[in-house]
Image: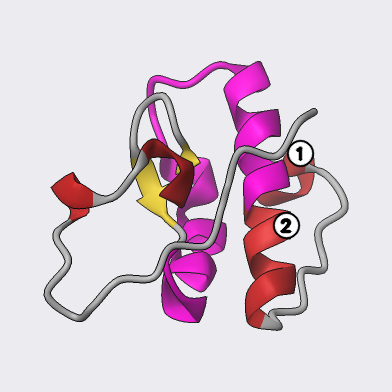
Amino acid sequence: MQITWKPVAHGGDASRAKLPDSAFAFPQERKEPLTDAGHVRSAIARFDSVDGVSNSERAQAFENIKAAAEYYGIALKASSWHDLVG
């Protein structure tokens, strides 16, 4: 699965609407922004509660979250998106 997430430089006043699709765990739906460590932790915690996405989109989002977690120095214990649902 290809990673679509890219780090985004944004100020504290940057609105979600101005973020590129590549800033989100679920880029097609623009759900779960991954703009800093706090948002990455939130995306991990809320992964199971994201509605209206396919298993393929979940797999894509997990790869994006893994990349963002590594970038922001967050230890991710899950090895698959299946580990985040339950």
Quarter placement of the N terminus? top right
Q: According to the image, label 2 marks what residue?
A: 66
Helix, strand or loop at label 1? It is helix
Check residue 38 for magenta coloring: yes
Up-down relation of residue 9 to residue 49 (above or below): below
Q: Which residues are magenta?
A: 35-64
Q: Is residue 38 left or right of residue 57?
A: left
Q: Nearer the viewer, mark 1 or mark 2?
A: 2
Q: Residue 38's quadrant in the figure?
A: bottom left
Q: Residue at x 67, y 69 (%)?
A: 69
Q: Give how far apart the Cα atoms at labels 1 and 2 are.
A: 13 Å
Tell which of 59 and 49 is nearer to you: 59
Q: Amino acid at mark 2?
A: Lys
Quarter placement of the C terminus? top right
Up-down relation of residue 70 to residue 2 (above or below): below
Residue 85 visible: no
Q: Classify 10 Å Cα crowding around label 1: few (below 14), some (14-19), many (20 and above).
A: few
